[in-house]
Image: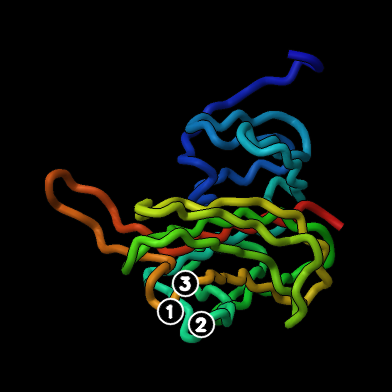
């Protein structure tokens, strides 16, 4: 190893829950996306599966959050986008949410990862589904992602990542829209299943937020 760093191993399951991170101000670099934590002298986090660099302060993440919804979400009116809402979270460093709004505690750059469980609840016609970011009530330019749900295709997972520059106190929302009759294409949440095998519940949306620095 360059620099002669020594390593200690602990366990972590894909970056959460981060509350199990040891507080070691003089020994802290973690690689995420792997159940192994590698700690050494330094001040950075290198996710194995995402090309992002997350800064640390005194051996701790400055701010992060994961926000989920256990509720199925659908357009109320044809061709009228909605902000996706949340009903649970895991956070550190002051990132908070109220309904659909996630609020930044620090000024700087945030890495945001979004996953939406798209399901055709009614019908079988082709559909276009869009999602984008809205900051303090204003749509962010060049932030849209789109997927096409082909005829007879019943479900898919919409995922995307984006970098946001936010001022402390600003909030952002993840918008959701499609060109189907309301209720036909939805962001679906399910309860855990027991047959033919046991599996946990599926959130309708998961949004991960990481503060990267000023």
Residue 146 versus residue 65: which sits nearer the camera?
Answer: 146
> Relative to residue 203, is residue 53 depicted above or below?
above
Q: Give me the residue at 49% from left, 62% from top.
A: 127
Image quadrant occupied by the C terminus:
bottom right
User: Residue beneath label 1, please?
Assistant: 182
Disc 3: CA contacts within 10 A as few (<14), some (14-19) or many (>=20): many
Picture coordinates of residue 83 (x, y %)?
58, 77
Residue 165 versus residue 128: which sits nearer the camera?
Answer: 128
Query: Which type of secondary structure does the marked residue at label 2 adopt?
Result: loop
Q: Give me the residue at 59% from left, 61% from top.
A: 65
Image quadrant occupied by the N terminus:
top right
Q: First in sequence: mark 2 or mark 1?
A: 2
Kindly report the distance in space between the C-alpha atoms of the residues bearing marks 3 and 2. Answer: 7 Å
Q: Give yes or no for contact between labels 2 and 1 (Cβ–Cβ under 8 Å).
A: yes
Q: First in sequence: mark 3 or mark 2?
A: 2
Q: Give yes or no for contact between labels 3 and 1 (Cβ–Cβ under 8 Å).
A: yes
User: Residue beneath label 2, please?
Assistant: 78
Q: Is residue 31 visible?
A: no
Query: Which type of secondary structure does the marked residue at label 1 adopt?
Result: loop
> Relative to residue 169, is residue 199 depicted above or below?
above
From this viewpoint, which residue is outermost toward the right? 214
Disc 1: CA contacts within 10 A as few (<14), some (14-19) or many (>=20): some
Query: Which type of secondary structure does the marked residue at label 3 adopt?
Result: loop
Q: Is residue 86 visible?
A: yes
Picture coordinates of residue 46 (x, y %)?
69, 35
From this viewpoint, which residue is outermost toward the left? 195
Kindly report the distance in space between the C-alpha atoms of the residues bearing marks 2 and 1. Answer: 6 Å
Q: Give me the residue at 56% from left, 70% from top.
A: 176
Residue 124 versus residue 81: which sits nearer the camera?
Answer: 124
Picture coordinates of residue 148 (x, y %)?
53, 54
User: Residue beneath label 3, please?
Assistant: 180
Kindly report the distance in space between the C-alpha atoms of the residues bearing marks 3 and 1. Answer: 6 Å
């Amino acid at each position: 190893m360059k620099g002669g760093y020594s390593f200690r191993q602990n366990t972590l399951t894909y970056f959460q829950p981060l509350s199990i991170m040891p507080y070691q101000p003089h020994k802290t670099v973690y690689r995420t996306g792997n159940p192994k934590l590698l700690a050494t002298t330094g001040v950075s986090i290198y996710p194995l599966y995402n090309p992002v660099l997350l800064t640390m302060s005194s051996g701790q993440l400055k701010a992060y959050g994961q926000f989920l919804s256990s509720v199925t979400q659908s357009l109320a009116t044809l061709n009228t986008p909605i902000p996706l809402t949340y009903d649970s979270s895991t956070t550190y460093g002051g990132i908070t949410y109220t309904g659909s709004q996630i609020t930044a505690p620090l000024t700087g750059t945030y890495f945001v990862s979004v996953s939406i469980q798209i399901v055709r609840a009614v019908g079988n016609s082709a559909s276009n589904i869009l999602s984008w970011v809205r900051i303090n009530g204003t749509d962010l330019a060049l932030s849209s992602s789109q997927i096409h749900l082909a005829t007879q295709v019943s479900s898919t997972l919409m995922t995307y990542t984006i970098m946001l520059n936010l001022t402390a106190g600003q909030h952002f929302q993840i918008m959701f829209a499609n060109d189907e009759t309301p209720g036909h294409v939805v962001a679906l949440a399910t309860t855990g299943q027991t047959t033919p095998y046991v599996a946990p519940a599926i959130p309708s949306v998961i949004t991960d937020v990481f503060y990267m620095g000023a």
